[in-house]
Image (tube, rainbow, N blue to C red):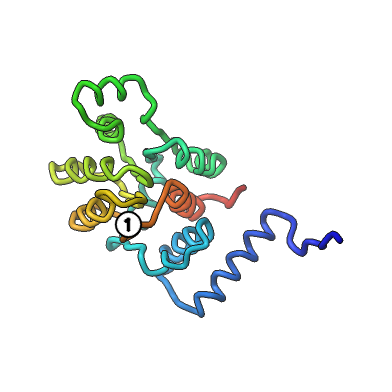
Amino acid sequence: MDTPLQYKRPREIEERSFAIIREELGGREFPAQEAPIIYRAIHTSADFDYADSLAFSPGAVEHALAALRQGACIVTDTQMAKSGINRAALQQAGCEVFCFMADEDVAQEASRRGVTRAVASIDKAVRLNRPTLFAIGNAPTALIRLYEHITAGFSPALVIGVPVGFVNVVESKEWILSTQAPYIVARGRKGGSNIAAAICNALLYQITERAF
């Protein structure tokens, strides 16, 4: 027997999902600009640990939103994260998103230097010389290289540090937490490209008309 679906439209499904999240959080309160990011990370993963593991540097969201309003670019460490960022919201914000991991010059530089493509892609992103949000959801080596640039004086508009895994993952996040750069970091082993994209979308939706 077919079961009638109570919620069929994307907007209705998402609104009901967020209502369930708020209910299961038991009325917990979060800072106004951080709450949409926490909710969207949970919505993307069905993992309520993000209510506690997401760490925000003071003023990080405000700083990131100001940069996006001025047309900052976003750099991801995977095509999956890049593809997951809402194109309509990007267009409304007048922003661009890049992933350099598959670029031939990045592959050549990584081979020549004996480093990962993630490291070489971060170096290329830094050379853009423009306000940049970094959304790292897969490669801790990208986060480590970004940490090195920050300690050398580079100033990112935001570091979204949410790589997932076991090797160098926790350490790379803690190094970012030790910097003065604006950051949103998922402490521990959890994260992923989907979480990186979700955080980017949560930021973009705060400065645009919400669009699917």
Marker count (numbered): 1
**Residue at the spot x=34%, y=51% of the render?**
165
Q: Which quadrant of the figure has residue 95?
A: top left
User: Where 174 falls versus 139 (above or below)?
Assistant: below
- Comparing 116 with 32, the one in front is 116
Residue 73 visible to an observer of this rendering: no
User: Where 74 falls versus 28 (above or below)?
Assistant: above
Residue, far right: 1
Residue 37 lies left or right of residue 157; in this view the side is right
User: Where 5 falls versus 211 (above or below)?
Assistant: below
| Residue at numbered disc 1 | 185
- Comparing 4 with 88, the one in front is 4
**Residue at the spot x=45%, y=35% of the render?**
79
x and y percentages locating residue 10 in the rendered image: 68, 54
Residue 194 lies left or right of residue 189; in this view the side is right
Residue 23 visible to an observer of this rendering: yes
**Residue at the spot x=51%, y=38% of the render?**
83
Amino acid type at circle 1 is Val
x and y percentages locating residue 21 in the rendered image: 55, 69
Residue, far bottom: 26
Q: Which element carries disc 1, helix, strand or loop?
A: strand
x and y percentages locating residue 24 in the rendered image: 54, 75
**Residue at the spot x=32%, y=61% of the render?**
56
Q: Tell me the crowding category of disc 1: few under 14, some 14 to 19, or many 20 or more residues within 10 angstroms, Cα based.
A: many
